[in-house]
């Protein structure tokens, strides 16, 4: 069985949602570009000049002006039916002249006598062929028109000065732009969804909210462990932020239990996967580091998460002692990896709640209280079984573990209500998977730089 480590579920999680939407948008933009038919544009340049006409003063200026005006008049002929019909016939194109006209665009460069002829097509070679053919047919058509003009009228001449080359890169679709726009749109949508989720969320994600529900101030919060070790001790002690969180919990817990007769504490949660078992290990280590004698008891006789986490599966334990198969001395184990003494869950039993509610459970706990300063008991989730409520009746205090931003308020309220029905002494709660406050991060980092 895998024990969930302390993972964050904070505002960073909402950014992750936004980035996920951004990645999805980028993929959609890329897919749309990949599925679209590419469009290539070939460009040809034509020069318009004029000759003839009545002699005037400043002839050079007049000819230039006349050429510019004529170029503006002639540019519309480039995509005329006469020109496009000739292009279709010369290239033997399988399209109507009107269809070809939609592919041709001719514009006069401002204050010049140059006409830029652009042809769009899905084939770069065909775009080039059509552009050059259109330029030649257009020039021939203009030359034919000269024969019908009066001698006194300026006669235009169209010359192809820059033939169209084969375009290498399509102008559409723009894959880079579409992917970027898709990513930005997806990111924006993702952040909106994340903010809506954050605004409408009824999950526990605030210390005051947590305190209001459990009726006690929180004992502290614990962030995700950055240590990826599978060993529970290394995972907890290998991250300064995590250990500082447990030290805060230790301080507040020992203050809350200053009048406790035996130091028996039940660690529970509303549901599974909230980091309860890992939290118990970290708190036990923090108490041991402060010089306290600590024993941890796996009172979850159904799942035995603590027993498996510490590698003690198959060892006799609490269930065996409660069933009368062995004594207390037989079930106490000191793992080599922990400065603690552990009582495993023992062999599986049919009715754990019956065993835990028997007088034998209270006797064993009283015996342990004479040997240790604190006895931390790992119990099942409150909403699943009655075991945790039964164990709470044998405890001086109950600590509720809640996963930050994940546990619903209603679930936590129901768990607290269950404990209230057995008059359990809830001394506080611990928020797991919580973000590290900026001030704590800065202070801890500054301390490490000094040492």
Image (cartoon, rainbow, N blue to C red):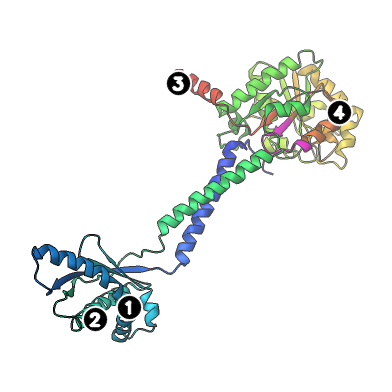
Could you classify mark 2 by the number of other residues whose Cα lies within 10 Å: few (under 14), some (14-19), or many (20 or more)? some
Q: Is residue 215 left or right of residue 101?
A: right
Tell me which numbered mark, 2 or 1, is placed earlier along the sequence. Answer: 1
Q: Is residue 450 left or right of residue 420?
A: left
Tell me which numbered mark, 4 or 3, is placed earlier along the sequence. Answer: 4
Magenta stretch in the rendered image: 401-411
- Residue drawn at 23 percent across, 69 percent down: 71
Q: Position of residue 243 (x, y in %)?
A: 60, 25
Q: Are marks 2 and 3 in contact (CB under 8 Å)?
A: no
Distance from disc 1 to disc 4, alpha carbons, whole Å, reads 89 Å
Could you classify mark 4 by the number of other residues whose Cα lies within 10 Å: few (under 14), some (14-19), or many (20 or more)? some
Mark sitting on residue 80: 1
154 relative to 314, above or below: below
Q: Is residue 206 visible?
A: yes
Q: Quadrant of residue 36?
A: bottom left
Distance from disc 1 to disc 3, alpha carbons, whole Å, reads 78 Å
Mark sitting on residue 141: 2
Q: Are marks 1 and 3 in contact (CB under 8 Å)?
A: no
Q: Is residue 266 visible?
A: no
Q: Are marks 2 and 1 in contact (CB under 8 Å)?
A: yes
- Residue drawn at 18 percent across, 67 percent down: 66
Could you classify mark 3 by the number of other residues whose Cα lies within 10 Å: few (under 14), some (14-19), or many (20 or more)? few
Tell me which numbered mark, 2 or 4, is placed earlier along the sequence. Answer: 2
Q: Are marks 1 and 4 in contact (CB under 8 Å)?
A: no
Mark sitting on residue 420: 4
């Amino acid at each position: 069985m895998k024990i969930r480590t302390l993972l964050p579920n904070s505002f960073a999680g909402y950014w992750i949602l936004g980035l996920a939407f951004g990645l999805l948008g980028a993929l959609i933009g890329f897919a749309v570009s990949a599925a679209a038919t590419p469009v290539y544009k070939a460009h040809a340049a034509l020069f318009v000049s004029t000759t003839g006409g009545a002699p005037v003063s400043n002839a050079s200026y007049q000819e230039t002006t006349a050429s510019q005006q004529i170029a503006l008049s002639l540019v519309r002929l480039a995509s005329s039916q006469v020109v496009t019909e000739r292009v279709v016939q010369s290239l033997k194109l399988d399209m109507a002249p009107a269809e070809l006209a939609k592919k041709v665009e001719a514009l006069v460069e401002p204050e010049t006598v140059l006409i830029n002829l652009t042809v769009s097509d899905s084939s770069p070679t065909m775009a080039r062929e059509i552009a050059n053919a259109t330029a030649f047919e257009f020039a021939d058509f203009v030359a034919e028109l000269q024969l019908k003009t009066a001698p006194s009228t300026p006669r235009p001449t169209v010359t192809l000065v820059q033939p169209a080359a084969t375009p290498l890169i399509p102008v559409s679709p723009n894959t880079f732009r579409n992917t970027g726009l898709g990513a930005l749109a997806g990111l924006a949508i993702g952040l909106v969804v994340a903010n809506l989720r954050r605004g409408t969320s009824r999950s526990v994600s605030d210390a005051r909210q947590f305190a209001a529900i459990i009726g006690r101030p929180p004992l502290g919060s614990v962030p995700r462990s950055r240590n990826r070790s599978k060993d529970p001790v290394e995972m907890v002690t290998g991250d300064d932020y995590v250990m500082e969180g447990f030290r805060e919990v230790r301080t507040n817990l020992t203050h809350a239990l200053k009048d406790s007769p035996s130091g028996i504490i039940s660690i529970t949660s509303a549901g599974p996967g909230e980091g309860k078992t890992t939290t118990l290990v970290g708190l036990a280590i923090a108490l041991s580091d402060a010089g306290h004698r600590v024993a941890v008891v796996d009172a979850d006789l159904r799942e035995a998460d603590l027993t498996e986490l510490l590698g003690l599966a198959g060892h006799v334990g609490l269930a065996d002692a409660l069933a009368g198969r062995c004594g207390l001395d037989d079930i106490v184990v000191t793992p080599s990896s922990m400065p603690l003494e552990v009582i495993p869950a023992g062999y599986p039993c049919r009715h754990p709640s019956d065993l835990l509610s028997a007088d034998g459970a209270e006797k064993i706990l009283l015996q342990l209280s004479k040997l240790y300063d604190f006895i931390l008991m790992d119990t099942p989730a409150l909403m699943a079984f009655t075991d945790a409520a039964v164990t709470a009746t044998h405890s001086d205090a109950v600590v509720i573990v809640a996963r930050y931003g994940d546990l619903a308020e209603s679930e936590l309220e129901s768990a607290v209500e269950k404990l209230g029905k057995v008059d359990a002494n809830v001394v506080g709660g611990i928020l797991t998977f919580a973000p590290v406050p900026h001030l704590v991060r800065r202070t801890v980092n500054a301390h490490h730089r000094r040492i």
